[in-house]
Amino acid sequence: MTHLKIGDIAPNFKLTSHLEKTTELTDLRGKTVVLAFFPLAWTPI
């Protein structure tokens, strides 16, 4: 597990959307990105 501190650059990763489209974090460079995690929400994301 990687532990990041405030101000650290996030490592690149890939996620698949609900539309089955894969997006990498580097694809969003220069844009505002917000990640929300809902543990145990039983959602597909």
Image (tube, rainbow, N blue to C red):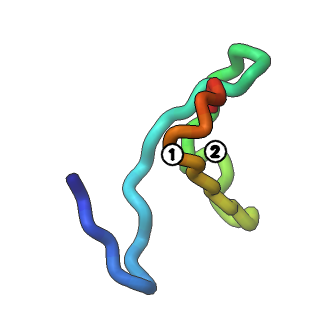
Q: Position of residue 38 (x, y in %)?
A: 59, 48
Q: Nearer the viewer, mark 1 or mark 2?
A: 1
Q: Which residue is mark 2?
A: 27
Going 70% across and 26% down the picture, which residue do you hit? 17
Going 63% across and 24% down the picture, which residue do you hit? 44
> Where 16 sits versus 28, above or below?
above
The three-letter amino acid code for the residue at tag 1 is Pro
Mark-to-mark CA distance, 1 and 2: 25 Å
Dot 1 falls on a residue whose secondary structure is: loop
Q: Which residue is mark 1?
A: 39
> Where 42 sits versus 24, above or below?
above
Asked whether 41 or 34 is in front, the reply is 41
> Where 32 sits versus 22, above or below?
below
Q: Position of residue 16 (x, y in %)?
A: 61, 25
Report the disc number at residue 30.
none
Dot 2 falls on a residue whose secondary structure is: helix
Displayed quadrant of residue 42 = top right
**Image quarter in which the C terminus is found:** top right
Q: Position of residue 30 (x, y in %)?
A: 70, 65
The answer to whether residue 38 is left or right of residue 4 is right
> Where 9 sits versus 16, above or below?
below
Q: Which residue reaches farthest bottom?
A: 6
The three-letter amino acid code for the residue at tag 2 is Asp
